[in-house]
Each structure stands twice: as C-alpha cells, then as structure tokens.
Image (tube, helix red, strand yellow):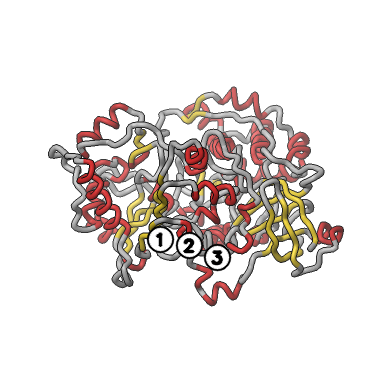
Amino acid sequence: MTNSVPELENADCILITGSNTTEGHPLIASWIFRAVEKGAKLIVVDPRNIQIAKKATLHLHQRPGSDVAWINGMMNIIIAEGLADKEFIEERTEDFDELKAVVAQYTPEKVEEISGIPADQLREAARIYGKANRAALIYAMGITQHTTGHDNVRNTANLAMLTGNVGRASTGVNPLRGQNNVQGACDLGGLPNVYSGYQRVSDPNVQAKFQEMWGSAGPLEVGLTITKTENAIHDGTLKAMFIMGENPLLSDPDVKHLEESLQHLDFLVVQDIFMTETAQLADLVLPGASFAEKEGTFTGTDRRVQRVRQAIPPLGNARTDWEIICDLAKRLKARLGQETNGAPYGGWDYASPKEVMDEIAAVTPIYGGVSYERLEALNFLQWPVPTPDHPGTPYLHKGKFSRGLGKFNPVEWKPADEEPDVDYPFTLTTGRIMFHFHTGTMTRRSEKLDKEVPEAYAEINPADAGLLEIQQGAKMRLVSRRGEIELKARITPRVPEKVVFVPFHFAEARANVLTPLTIDPVAGIPEYKVSAVRVEKI
C-alpha cells in the first residue's frame, strides 16, 4: 500500500474494486466503515452484491474482465469535466498527453457496451472520485488475477495520479495482500527476480554487493514464477521442488495438470504444519512450526513490520522454518565444498531470528533501520526505514516519486483469454469467504468455523437456476475445458445472470480444477477470475 490502513478513516472518498473487503480483510473494512460514518463517499466496483456494497454510495456492477475499460472511462470523464489535478500533473508527472489520447476513446457509452456499467452511473462515480480532496483507491486480487492484471494495476496508478491522489495522507493506491505476511515474503526475496528489498538479481552492482556480503550471490539470473514451473518439469529442466507453507493442489490453476506435473518430479519436499493435499504427494515431508511456536516478524499489507512472539514451544518433531532452512543450507554447503571467504554474512550459524533481522537490515536498504530493539520500543515500523534513527514512512511518494516524475502508462482494454461461448456459456469467478482461509488447511480443522460453511457451493442467479431447473441446495455440475466438479447450488441474486461464483477453499470440489493456466504476460499471475464454464443439473 502507498498509504497506511488507519489513514482510510479520514478519506473523503474510497474506491474499492476487486476486493470483498468485509470477508477477505474484515479489520481493514472496519476503518472504511469509520470513514463512511464520518461522511466519506464509498464507491464499490464488483460484479457481485458483496456485503460492503450495502454501505456504498454507489455500486457499479462490471462484467468480469472489463476493469481497464471502466477505469479508462472514469479518466475520460474526469478529463472532459475538468476534474483532473492540473498542477499535480504538470509538476509531478510525465506522458499525460499519451494517456489523454488513449482514454479519449473510452466514452461512457463505449464503456457501457464493454463493461455493462450504465453510462450515467460511471459519470457519477467519476465525479465523486474526481471532486474528492482525499480519495483512496483499494484493490485486491479481483483485479490482479487476470491475463490483464498488470494493466489493471497500472491503470489504478494512472487514475490516482490524474487526480493528484498520491503522496498525501488518506489517498493513494492500496493493494490488500492475500495473507498476513505476503508483503514480508516479497520484501525479503520471495520473488524469482529480486534479492531482498526488490534489488534486481540482474543488476551487476547489486550482484557485486551481495557477493561481498555473502561470499556468493547464488545464480545470477531470473528464476521461474510458479506458473512457469510446470513446463520446466515437463521439459526436464526442473527435477526437484521444495514447497514451504503452500498448498498448490488447491490454490494453483488447472490443478489436475499440476498434480500430474508434480508426480513427474524426481524429488518433492513439502514443509508444512499439516499433511496437506500437496504434502500427500511428497517424497519427504518436513514438519514446520506454526506462527504461535516461533519468533520473528510479519510485514503487513501497509508495509508495517511487527514482532511475532513465541507463545508455546514447537509441538512434537516440528521445527521453525528458519532452523530447517539453515540446517539444510549448511549440509548443502558441506556437500558442495563451498567457502564463504570471510564474508560478513556468509554463514548460516544464527543464534536466533534477531540475528537474521540484523542481516536483513544490513543488506536491505528499505529495512536498514529495522531492529528488534526498535520494534519492541515502537511496536511497529513502516518501511522504508533507511537508518536506525528514521521514524518510518506512513505513506509513500511525498514530494516526489522514487523514479522522479510519475509516469502515466496508458493501457487499452483487451478481453479475457477465455470468454463464454455456446458450449461454455457461463463465466466462473472464484474467491474467498469469511469463514475459511486460503486452502482451508487450518480453518477446516476448526470445528466452529467448519460448522459455519461445511461444504463447497456455487452461487448462481435465480434466473439461471430456474432455466436449468436447479433447486436451492441441490447438487450441480460445473464443467470447463479442463475438468469438472460437483457441488451444491446456492441460488442468490448476489451474482448477475450468466455468472457463477465458487469459493476455492474446498478440497472435495476444487474450484481450480476448472480455471485455466493462462497467465498475465508481465506479472505471471493466473487468470482465476474469468473462466468459461457450463452448468449442468444433476
């Protein structure tokens, strides 16, 4: 997030798209409700009648996969009606004329044809957002999990810059992360193209820095994203895999194909706290410790670094992740005969997670001033924290962007890779519900949570259910080009006609049997939110 979660309370306007906030991020939703109680205008753009839309000033129902079009349409209206922040554009941005030329084509009437959003509603939304003094834009995976996810995100930045809603409190572009430490994992190197702090592995200066710090910088080339590993397995270039704290046999697209791929590996290791569906395929399962059994830090969606404190010792044979990784690394180094040549951080002999954090601060500029001592005293720090006396950064881009001028990146709307047709006339979109977390590895073991939603279901519009003669609670079959699942029908006007929604938490009816392995060409993220399916009565 460019801004902080508590800042939402003081926004004049909050635009939410691709986020079922009350179910996916209920604590963040509470700050949004506070803003609404203070008089903020809330705009929700979502195909479904999600809970938070009940509090909205305006709810726009877009067709799945049309996000670039409606954002371009809002910018068209803002420019045409003189609501753009001319001073901000002139002083802090570049390439505005290119953006203006592209969005000029997206009249409200054209956007209505593409997205289904009535032209007058789009005009109203653009005026509310464009006139606000402090407008915050919130999005989540509802706009990223598309073949055009990269374009969708760039366009949110275009909209914020166009109205000068960047670099000030209670504004900004604010993505909500899917799990509690996704931000921290990305910050500290959990991506295939960067070291910690988003330092590119392909940059010779960065390589030299890590070689000096570590005595080695490992393979100095960009690795594979998870969606590209399947092809690497099949062509023989990827022979072993180590999966830690992830259950891809429920969470990844086209999971039947993935299951076949994992079985082709020479060696599969899974490190987890439960015997997940993926762990059942592994040659070796390493028992990890849960969050309550270890020390460390989490970095939240608004760059907030906080301490995690051990509540109980690890149960049974479980060990903390960092201890397992360090032991494995030391054995590999001994087997390979690697030397660290006196590098300051070349070994794996940490006495505690605190020493790991000290190394993180030494090699990662945005975490340079983070330490356990400061976290204990202050409760949290928000990066960038470049020095030990830096107070942290509640919001980004104050005064200037990290690249200097903010660059407008105009994008054209492109349809989803797989649209409905005669054989598969429905659009499937997937997502989360309040009572289960991710693949249900933990929440479905909770008796109370599982009692709330004990089995899989699909939301279907009453008109569609009537035509197909499907009754409430009856079993129905969803079929895509990749496979089929059977699950109960939940007949509800929450979803529009010709759209079905399926939560992905349930192993007995894996939603991702249906989703395609088509990815965004830039970000590599799968298209979970638009798949063509057929609905059959059982």
**Residue beneath disc 1:** 272
Residue 339 in the image: above or below residue 34: above
**Residue beneath disc 3:** 436
Q: Nearer the viewer, residue 142 or 437?
A: 437
Decide: few, some or many residues near mark 3? Use Cα within 10 Å; few <14, some 14-19, many ≥20: many
Q: Nearer the viewer, mark 2 or mark 3?
A: 2
Give the secondary structure at mark 1: strand
Res 17 visible: no
Decide: few, some or many residues near mark 1? Use Cα within 10 Å; few <14, some 14-19, many ≥20: many
Amino acid type shown at disc 3:
His
Give the secondary structure at mark 2: loop
**Residue beneath disc 2:** 276
Decide: few, some or many residues near mark 2? Use Cα within 10 Å; few <14, some 14-19, many ≥20: many
Tell which circle, 1 or 3, labels the residue nearer the N-terminal end: 1
From the top left corner, tell me how far across and down residue 211 is, in percent.
23, 34
Q: CA distance from mark 1 to mark 2?
A: 8 Å
From the top left corner, tell me how far across and down residue 463 is, in percent.
84, 58
The image quarter containing residue 379 is: bottom left
Q: CA distance from mark 2 to mark 3?
A: 15 Å
